[in-house]
Image (cartoon, rainbow, N blue to C red):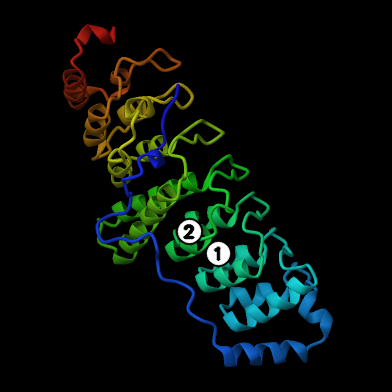
């Protein structure tokens, strides 16, 4: 099945009105502080500036975690000169990965400018892009994406997921937490918006909407539907994908997104998700590995019967097709 990625639609921008893919980052280093940091390091014992402690941390890891930009830059210069800029601590994180996790976009940019390995991964197979997507740090993500085409947008972590999968899952977790608060938590609202922005940025830079995570073959749409993540479902189904019908009907271990939506019993967004999928070409006659059509998976009772009738009516199917 040949499906074209949204990146082929060159006129489409996945960012919302007023958003820019070029976020502001990396103000100039403070020259005075940088010179002081270089002098500080030159006065230290050589081994202290280049060796690792019992946890595998170099002085660069420590400065980076603390957000001490000029000190980190000076330490990075020293480690670069001895070929140890990408030294890993006990969890497999290079200083670049620590900078990403600590949400230090300026240090991320500095380290990349000094030659840090942008595709290095930790003990879980997570690259800088995976971590930025997971934590939902748009400025960090932009600093990494500015290094295209060097950065691998389709890198897989040891769970078989791309950065786009990580961004979608993380957004779903935040949306679930936000829903539990009655949508009143301003901090969670901000974090949800930042994580959705990360999804948008990855797609804008060419991440494949069609990539399936390895364990269960889910696309980002399957992941969004399975969690009842209405904001992400709405967004994904607005993308002008030339073969949207084929994309919507892709299977994850036999289940289409419509099967997953039918299983969202009790979710307040179930009906809207069903209708959105149908409007974009979801086929309610497709059967899963258990020979069930989506309508078979709807909840029992009057509510389920109502949705079953709506599903069939929207698709122009007769009730006997469920038999």
Q: Is residue 303 above or below residue 174?
A: above
Residue displayed at 70% across by 79% down:
75
Residue 79 occupies which quadrant of the picture?
bottom right
Q: Quadrant of residue 90?
A: bottom right
Residues at marks 1 and 2, CA–CA distance in whole angstroms:
7 Å
- In what quadrant of the picture does the N terminus appear? top left
Neighbours of disc 2 within 10 Å: few (<14), some (14-19), many (20+): many
Residue count near mark 1 (Cα–Cα under 10 Å), binned few <14, some 14–19, many ≥20 = some
**Residue furthest toward the front?**
10
Residue 240 placement (x, y as % from top left): 30, 38
Q: Is residue 217 left or right of residue 293?
A: right
Is 190 above or below relative to 301?
A: below
Q: How many marks?
A: 2
Q: Nearer the viewer, residue 2 or 137?
A: 2
- Residue 263: tell me if it is visible: no
The reply to whether the C-beta atoms of the residues labelled 1 and 2 are less than 8 Å apart is yes
For label 2, the residue is: 135
Image quadrant for the C terminus? Answer: top left
> Residue visible at 69% across and 87% down?
38
Residue identified by numbered label 1: 101
């Amino acid at each position: 099945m040949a499906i074209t990625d949204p990146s082929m639609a060159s006129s489409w921008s996945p960012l919302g009105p007023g958003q820019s893919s070029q976020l502001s980052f990396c103000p100039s280093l403070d020259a005075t502080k940088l010179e002081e940091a270089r002098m500080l390091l030159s006065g230290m014992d050589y081994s202290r500036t280049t060796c690792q402690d019992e946890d595998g941390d170099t002085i660069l890891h420590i400065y980076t975690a603390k957000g001490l930009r000029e000190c980190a830059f000076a330490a990075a210069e020293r480690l670069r000169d001895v070929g140890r800029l990408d030294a890993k601590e006990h969890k497999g994180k290079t200083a670049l990965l620590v900078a990403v996790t600590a949400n230090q976009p300026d240090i991320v940019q500095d380290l990349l400018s000094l030659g840090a390995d942008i595709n290095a991964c930790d003990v879980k197979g997570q690259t800088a892009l995976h971590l930025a997507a997971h934590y939902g740090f748009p400025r960090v993500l932009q600093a990494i994406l500015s290094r295209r085409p060097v950065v691998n947008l389709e890198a897989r972590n040891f769970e078989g997921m791309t950065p786009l999968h990580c961004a979608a899952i993380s957004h779903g977790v935040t949306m679930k937490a936000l829903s539990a608060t009655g949508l009143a938590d301003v901090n969670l609202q901000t974090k949800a918006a930042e994580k959705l922005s990360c999804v948008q940025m990855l797609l804008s830079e060419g991440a494949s909407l069609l990539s399936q995570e390895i364990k269960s073959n889910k696309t980002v749409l399957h992941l969004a539907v399975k969690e009842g993540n209405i904001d992400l479902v709405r967004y994904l189904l607005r993308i002008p994908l030339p073969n949207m019908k084929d994309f919507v009907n892709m299977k994850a271990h036999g289940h289409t997104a419509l099967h997953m939506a039918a299983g969202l019993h009790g979710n307040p967004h179930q009906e809207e998700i069903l209708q959105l999928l149908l409007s974009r070409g979801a086929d309610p006659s497709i059967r899963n590995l258990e020979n069930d059509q989506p309508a078979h998976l709807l909840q029992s009772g009057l509510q389920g019967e109502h949705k079953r009738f709506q599903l069939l009516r929207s698709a122009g199917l007769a009730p006997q097709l469920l038999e």
